[in-house]
Each structure stands twice: as C-alpha cells, then as structure tokens.
Amino acid sequence: MKMVFCLFCLMAFTAFEDPVQSQITSLVQSLDYIVVIPNNNAYKPGSFVARTGYDPAEQVVSSTKLAFLCTPKYSSGKIDAEEIRRSVGGFFSLPGYWIELQKEFVGKYLRMPNTAEYAESIVVRIVDRTTIEYSAEKLVEIRANLGPTCKSSIQAGISNNNAYQIAGVYEMRLQYEVRYPANLVDTYKTRIQNEMRRLGMLSTDADVQTIKGDVSVYGIKWDKLSKL
C-alpha cells in the first residue's frame, strides 16, 4: 500500500509553502528532531549554534535556520567523543512502501516542468535513516574544554537567550526514481536530466528508462544553554 503521507526532497524553496516539506517536518518532529533549513549536515553533535531568522515568540520549534556560535574546530572538534550510531535501513524499500508524486505537484512545486510533462512516473522512497548522538557527559566535557574566545561568543548568545548545543543529529536519505518512455527523444531526456542536476539530485546510476537520485534530510536535537 502507499503511505498516507507524502515525502520528498527538502528543497531550499522558501518563497512558497511546500506541502512536501511540511510533511517531512512533521515526520522528523514526530521523532523529536528539528529540521535544519536549508538542508545542511555541517551541524555535528557537540556544536554550539544560534537560531537565525526566527520568531522569538514561537512556542514549538519544528524547523530552524542556524549559525555557529563557535567554530567546531575550537569546540566540538577538540574532543574525541565516542559516537553512538543507530541505523534503520530501507523500510521504505519493502514492497509497497513507496510514493508516486503527482505530476502537477512536480511541475508546480518542484519546478520541474519537463519531468512533469514527459516522465511516466516519479517515485520516492526512504533508503535509510541514521542517528548520531553524544552522551550528556561528552557534551559537558566539550563545554568544559572551551577556550576564552568560544566562551565569550557562547556567553553572548546565552545573554540573548539564543544559545544551543547540539546533542544529536538525524539523517534521512531519500531516493527518487523518474521513469520515462523508451521512445522518448534524447532532447527531452536531456531536459529531465538538467532539471535534476539543477536540484543537485542526479546520480550516475541511470538505466535506459530510469533516472535515480538521492537527497538527505537533516534534523537535530539540542540543549538550550542558560550557563556554561
């Protein structure tokens, strides 16, 4: 059976409400993670960050833009912290666990008009999910080993009620497949491929009628800091 919610790529389209991004945000939030916008894996466990471009009155944080308060090289990068990894692989690759996107949605919201017009189908599945988290002890150790410059920057963030330490990250890798007719002329195949390249999602794994691409969605858990 098809899933009752729709998943696709976390795009950096901020000029309109993306219903797929909304569903991704809901899914990641249900796992107690916050979606990082734009999609970015730079924020590792132990890092110190502040929110940017947000409403301070927001009660429930489901997604956020971030900036570093302290360069990781001088904070989390100083500690050889043991990582705890847990992977959940491929439950969407099981029979029936896939989603076929509506062509109207692909053309309008993903801005891929040639793909919408000439593809036979556009299918999305989750390939795998991974979490990486630090223990509370390691997070304390990182804070205890900060230099004066990092401490000063983080203290300024605390004073502004905008300082966080990332405790864990979540990665969800999505794979989509665009299938087109065998007799599609090369001109339109190239247009489809160019649309995928523009979005940074074209893989080299393509057969004569299917183009595949991967994209990752990142979420975080954080500890809000009131002191160091």
Image: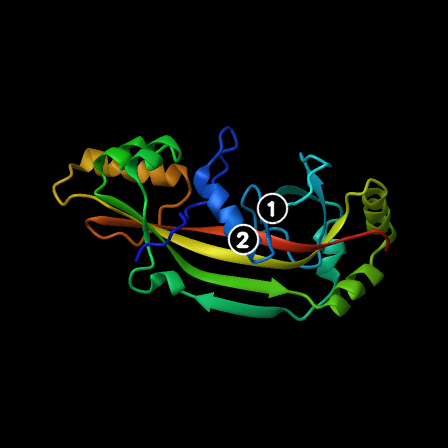
Horizontally, is 206 left or right of 20 in the view?
Answer: left
Q: Quadrant of the image for the N terminus?
A: bottom left
Q: Say what amino acid the circle numbered 2 marks.
A: Val
Residue 55 in the image: state x and y as whole percent. Answer: 69, 34
- Viewer-closest of 28 and 176: 28
Residue 10 in view in this figure:
no
Q: Residue at x 82, y 50 (%)?
A: 150
Q: Secondary structure at mark 1?
A: loop
Horizontally, is 107 left or right of 159 in the view?
Answer: left
Q: Say what amino acid the circle numbered 1 marks.
A: Ser
Horizontally, is 48 left or right of 26 in the view?
Answer: right
Q: Quadrant of the image for the C terminus?
A: bottom right
User: Residue 120 sits in which quadrant?
Assistant: top left
Which residue in the protein does label 1 denote? 62
Q: CA distance from mark 1 to mark 2?
A: 8 Å
Residue 113 in the image: state x and y as whole percent. Answer: 30, 31
Residue 58 in view in this figure:
yes
> Mark number for residue 28?
2
Horizontally, is 156 left or right of 9 in the view?
Answer: right
Q: Residue at x 87, y 51 (%)?
A: 148
- Viewer-closest of 211 and 128: 128
Q: Is residue 151 above or below residue 140?
A: above
Q: Answer yes or no: do the residues labelled 1 and 2 have beta carbons within 8 Å?
A: yes
Residue 87 in the image: state x and y as whole percent. Answer: 50, 68
Residue 169 in the image: state x and y as whole percent. Answer: 60, 58
Circle 2 packing at 10 Å, graded few (<14), some (14-19), many (20+), is many
Q: Is residue 47 above or below residue 201?
A: below
Q: Secondary structure at mark 2?
A: helix
